[in-house]
Image (spheres, rainbow, N blue to C red):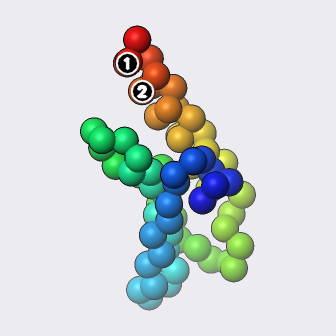
Amino acid sequence: MSTVGLGVREIRIHQAGEFRVLYVANFPEAIYVLSAFEKRTRKTPQRELELAADRFRSVSEERRRQRR
C-alpha cells in the first residue's frame, strides 16, 4: 500500500466478515504490524490508513535513530 508507506503490504482475511492487516516486512529484524481492523465498507477507512502511516513513520524514525 504505497499510500501508507514504501513496502507496506496488506493481508485480506475473509472469515465471517472482512478483516485487513497492514504490515511492513522490509526490515531484517522484524515484521511490523501497523494496523489490523474489520472492514465494514468497500473503502478502507481513512483513519486506518492515517494510523498505519503514522506508525510506519514512527518505525522508520526509530530505526534511523538506532543506527546512529
Check the image and name the residue furthest to the top.
68
**In the drawing, does residue 31 fall left or right of residue 13?**
left
Q: Which mark is residue 66?
A: 1
Q: Is residue 19 above or below residue 50?
A: below
Rendered residue at 52%/54% (across/down):
8
Q: Which mark is residue 63?
A: 2
Instruction: Tell me if mark 1 has few (under 14), some (14-19) or many (20+) residues whose alpha carbon lies within 10 angstroms of its own.
Output: few
Closer-to-camera residue (30/38): 30
Rendered residue at 58%/73% (across/down):
39
Rendered residue at 71%/57% (across/down):
46
Q: Is residue 38 above or below residue 33?
A: below
| Residue 43: % across, % down | 71, 73
Closer-to-camera residue (30/19): 30
Amino acid under label 2? Arg
The answer to whether residue 51 is visible is no
**In the drawing, does residue 35 fall left or right of residue 42?**
left
Residues under numbered marks 1 and 2 in contact, where contact means CB atoms less than 8 Å apart:
yes
Image quadrant occupied by the C terminus? top left
Question: Considering the numbered disc 2 on the image, is that residue within a helix, a strand or a loop?
Answer: helix
Image quadrant occupied by the N terminus? bottom right
